[in-house]
Amino acid sequence: MGILNDLKALAQGLGIAGKHLGRHAVTIQYPEQRDEIPERSRGMVVLLSDKETGELNCTACMLCERTCPSSAITIDAPRGEDKKKQLAQFIVDHSLCCFCGMCEEACNFSAIKLAQKYEFSMLKASDLIWDIKTLQQWGKDVPYEDTRRRKNPVRKVGAAAETEGANMTKDSEPEDGEEKKPARTERKDKPAPAAEPVNKEEGQQ
Amino acid sequence: MIVALELLPIFQWLGELLGGLGLPASWIDPIRYGALGVMMFGILAVVALFLVWWERKIAAHIQQRFGPMRHGWHGWYQTIMDAIKLLQKEDVRVATRDKAVFFWAPVVGFVAAFLAYIVIPWGDGLIVADLNIGILYIMAVTTFTVISLLMAGWGSHNKYALLGGMRSAAQVVSYEVPMVVSVLTVIIFVGSLSMVDIVKSQQGLIFNWFVFRLPMGPLAFLTFIVAATAEANRTPFDIPEAEQELVAGYNIEYSGMKFAMFFLAEFVNMFTVSAVAVTLFFGGWNGWEFVPSWIWFLFKTLLVVLLLMLFRWTYPRLRVDQLMEFAWKFLVPLTFANLIVAGIFKYLGWYW
Amino acid sequence: MAELRTEEFVVNMGPHHPSTHGVCRLMLTMDGEIVTKIEPVIGYLHRSIEKICENRTYAQCVPLMDRVEYVTAMSCGYMFAGAVEKLGGIEVPLRAQYLRTIMLELNRIASHLLFYGVTAMDIGAYTPFLYGLRERELIIDLFEETCGQRLTYNYIRIGGVSQDIRPDFVPKCREALNVISAKMSDYTGLLNENPIWIHRTKGVGVLPADLAKAYGVSGPNLRASGVNYDIRRNDPYLLYDKFDWNVAVRPNGDCFDRYMLRLDEIMQSIRIVTQALDGLPDGEIMAKGVTVNYKAPAGEVYHRVENSRGELGVYIQSDGGKKPVRVKIRGGSYNSLMVLPHFATNRMIADLVAIFATLDVIMPEVDR
């Protein structure tokens, strides 16, 4: 009978809801408990520093600024009197950034990364525009794989000169018979712009 | 037959104290009644606060999450904090409102919810006044909430609130009929309208409870609980409170403490209909003697309240015309048929 | 005796909604409880994506495409990448195609689970929302482990996918699919035979097949009206013609059928993903010769994808330069929203809420 079927369906619904009463919750109590963030998670943009000297790895090659689809990165890199590139300022506007990760993929010098951190809400929108010192500070304890073949950071002037470890790294010579670099972020065979050996002039376009 | 004032030792002590102070006898009784009223109010306020917290926890655990956890162990004083928050909210009053009607609507609703507790038997000998028209009095008093809904809808000077108020008034009035007729089905076998008599006639084994004993007991219980859910404006009959419906409920223009009164009145109403269901169908305060009777009553009532909460968090909402159709075309004929069958059984003596 | 005169009044079902349909404004002309006219007002979520794309290189357009319809961002990313690949004649490696198919179908399951929760919530049952989202978390976690984001993935690139899956993706994916198929009995048991649900959805809001075809409605809304048209079958892309699966069709076109059809589609998507996981080959994940500065050759192309909401298509016109000349996106929700005034009138407002919920309209696709 229709009525009995209806009653049975209603009781079945109650049973399904009721059986969840004894189950453990699937939520966690934030902020006391935090969820484990996957390794590839894309959070805030940070600038990475050399693991030994603490100097910023950036060479002002401007690839990230050109790749960014949201124009969130602004780099001030004037040429010095000897026509060599210098890094003066590096600004990332996190209110414009869409966290796509293209800057990290474009960088050949392990200089910029999207860290796993996501808790950076600010009270004012202007506080979301971070300059080079803040970016370095946030990137201090971010683990990364240094895939540079040799360290050739650029000379730092202006605001960049006040960052930690500025201008401390000596230009190291390429080792003999060194092998092709491992792929960044476990990608296979994606022909990045730096698949060929990079020397200083080509990298600093 | 007044029971609580005579039997409870605290009120005897109060009476002696006041007599010893030299007050004339005509003053002692009103003061004792007043103290009893304050105590009842206190108990009910605690019950309402507990029910609000419990609903949030039940809803959360059905949905596999936690619910309130911060204020106290598992959030037990969350409701108190919510009440304090509502107290300090601005009392927004519509400028074009009907002043007296707008002001008195929550009061009427609140009072109507609390008036029913004069005859609810909390335990053996624990009833404020055992009126000999007990259950009829409850049915009459719970209808007062309709007046408060209409007053709220009218006084808000808002066509949507008015529509919502009239819809919920129509809903409450329609579901009164099956509720009363289901109650009548049980009263036929008790022979008296007094709540204490109803409970006493279910003494003994668990099979003496009317839900098991009478041949139409389960059906009467089902129709009663459905009608009671509609009376208390709970899902699946919660058109007045639903946010997804465009025409919002009668209480949209209320804020702060006035809103809190409507809210508390709803939970007190829910407890009332559960208490009535327990009294009529589940033996009231009867149970094994090693546990006091009021604990049995509370336990059984909270189980029925749990059932009402499960209804809310499981079932979708009925549309307004489906709701009215369900009441008038299905429940009313069914309960009347049940009543006639009950009458035949009583006449022929086919019950035990 | 004077005749009782009733007036029609206009109610604004405003841009802010209690349910997650997005910012859609419906102006309803009501006669008492009955809705006599519906006028949708859109544009609250217009972000001029198509214009922005004219100033971005092809690779820079890809993260932007996720935002066209963020509930099924994988389909949007593939729509664009597939169009550029068609234009440029790029051959995508087989492993990348398998990965793309898996991701697209997982995204479809997640979107339909969200639909299930939101529809139930609109019709008054609050609990299924949490149950649907609990299962959707499993899929979203898989996505986060693979590409790093939960909603806007930037995973499907021109020429392939951006990163390979982790080694534990396949077992985790199978486990998630097992959990979802097991929980389907919970979902159906809660609602399918519930008399209240049946009264609210059966026979309500019937979309006739010819009206749907006339307005270009596609996807689940069309198939629930009895029309057997699925782009994955009629105009195959990726690997859909290699797998064994059925197109779900339902005859009646009422709210109940639209709801049931999406649950059917979840089961079919589980079939597809299981077969894809079984046959996942090794290989490369990106085509050779596609760089960040890819320039598509001159020409125009239209590529379409079967999204959870219908036909999602993009038309790209290129003159051989770095940036496209014109990008035009077509979303299925737009047609579903525009056919709403033509079959949902003369009903009560509660029915309108149910119909709107089962049409599964997502506003970013309407406004772009």
Image (cartoon, helix red, strand yellow):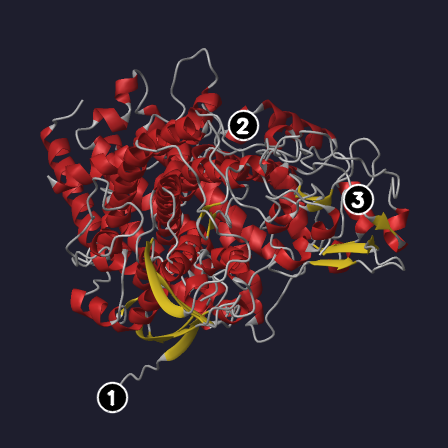
Q: Nearer the viewer, residue C198 or B84?
A: C198
Q: Are circles 1 and 2 on residues that touch, CB within 8 Å?
A: no
**Residue A184 at x, y percent in the picture:** 60, 38
Q: Can residue B163 be seen?
A: yes
**What residue appears at the point 42 percent right and 63 percent down from the top-left corner?**
C365
* Chain under disc 1: C
Tag 1: Cα neighbours inside 10 Å, few (<14), some, or many (≥20)? few
Would you name the residue on which mark 3 appears?
Answer: A153
Would you name the residue on which mark 2 appears?
Answer: B6
Q: CA distance from mark 1 to mark 3?
A: 94 Å
**Residue B37 at x, y percent in the picture:** 58, 40
Callout 1 amino acid: Met
- Looking at the rendered structure, whether the residues under marks 3 and 2 are on a common chain is answered as no
Q: Nearer the viewer, residue B239 or C149?
A: C149
Position above or below: B92 against B211:
below
**Residue C344 at x, y percent in the picture:** 27, 68
Q: CA distance from mark 3 to mark 2?
A: 93 Å
**Residue B298 at x, y percent in the picture:** 46, 27
Would you name the residue on which mark 1 appears?
Answer: C1
Callout 2 amino acid: Glu
Q: Report the number of discs.
A: 3
Q: Nearer the viewer, residue A81 or B236?
A: A81
Q: Nearer the viewer, residue B132 or B19?
A: B132
* Chain under disc 2: B
Point out the residue furthest to the top here.
Answer: B290
Q: Can residue A40 be seen?
A: no
Report the quarter where the N terminus of chain C lies: bottom left
